[in-house]
Image (cartoon, rainbow, N blue to C red):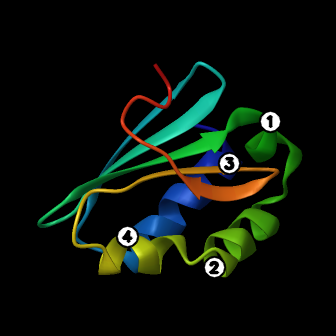
C-alpha cells in the first residue's frame, strides 16, 4: 500500500476506531472493505485520483465529503466511489 492509500485508511480508522479494513488495489481502484461493529461498507477510490493527489488533499476531501460521518450514520451498508469528479454512491456490482 502506498503512502496516499495509507493516508485514506488511517483517516477512516481514526473516525471508525473499532473497524477492520481490508485493502486491495486492482482494476484501477483502491478498494477498502470497512468492517464496522454492525455493518460492512466499501469505499472505492480511483487509482488515478489517489496517484494525482497529495496526502493532505486526500484527508481534506475525506472530510469535505463527510465519508466517515456517512458510514458512521448509515443504517445499511454503503458502497462509495471517490474520484476527480467527487463522490457518489454505487452498488456492489460497481467494480465487476
**Circle on res. 63:** 2
Q: Mark 1 packing: few (<14 Cα in 10 Å), some, or many (20+)? A: few
Sequence-first tag of 4 and 3: 3
Sequence-first tag of 1 and 4: 1
| Tag 4 and tag 2, C-beta contact below 8 Å | no
Question: Label 1 to label 3, Cα distance in Å?
Answer: 14 Å
Residue at mark 1: 48
| Tag 1 and tag 3, C-beta contact below 8 Å | no
| Residue at figure coordinates x 43%, y 75% from the top left | 70
Q: Mark 4 packing: few (<14 Cα in 10 Å), some, or many (20+)? A: many
Q: Provide residue 51's location: percent of width, then percent of height.
A: 80, 40
Q: Provide residue 65's location: percent of width, then percent of height.
A: 64, 74
Task: Please tell me whether residue 92 is drawn above or below residue 73 in the rendered image.
Answer: above
Left or right position of 17 against 47 = left
Question: Label 4 to label 2, Cα distance in Å?
Answer: 12 Å
Q: Provide residue 5's location: percent of width, then percent of height.
A: 62, 47
Q: How many marks?
A: 4
Left or right position of 76 against 57 = left
SS at mark 3 in the image: helix
Question: Label 1 to label 4, Cα distance in Å?
Answer: 23 Å
| Residue at figure coordinates x 71%, y 70% from the top left | 61
Q: Mark 3 packing: few (<14 Cα in 10 Å), some, or many (20+)? A: few
Question: Label 4 to label 3, Cα distance in Å?
Answer: 23 Å
Instruction: Quadrant for residue 74, please give it.
Output: bottom left
Sequence-first tag of 1 and 3: 3
Task: Please tell me whether residue 52 is drawn above or below residue 88 in the rendered image.
Answer: above
Sequence-first tag of 2 and 1: 1
SS at mark 1 in the image: helix
| Residue at figure coordinates x 37%, y 70% from the top left | 71
SS at mark 4 in the image: helix
Residue at mark 3: 3
Amino acid at each position: 500500500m502506498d503512502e496516499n492509500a495509507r493516508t485514506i485508511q488511517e483517516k477512516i480508522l481514526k473516525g471508525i476506531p473499532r473497524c477492520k479494513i481490508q485493502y486491495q488495489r486492482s482494476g484501477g481502484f483502491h478498494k477498502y472493505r470497512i468492517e464496522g461493529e454492525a455493518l460492512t461498507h466499501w469505499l472505492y477510490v480511483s487509482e488515478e485520483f489517489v496517484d494525482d493527489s497529495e496526502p493532505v488533499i486526500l484527508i481534506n476531501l475525506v472530510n469535505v465529503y463527510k465519508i466517515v460521518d456517512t458510514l458512521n450514520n448509515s443504517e445499511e451498508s454503503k458502497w462509495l466511489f471517490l474520484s476527480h469528479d467527487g463522490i457518489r454512491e454505487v452498488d456492489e456490482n460497481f467494480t465487476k
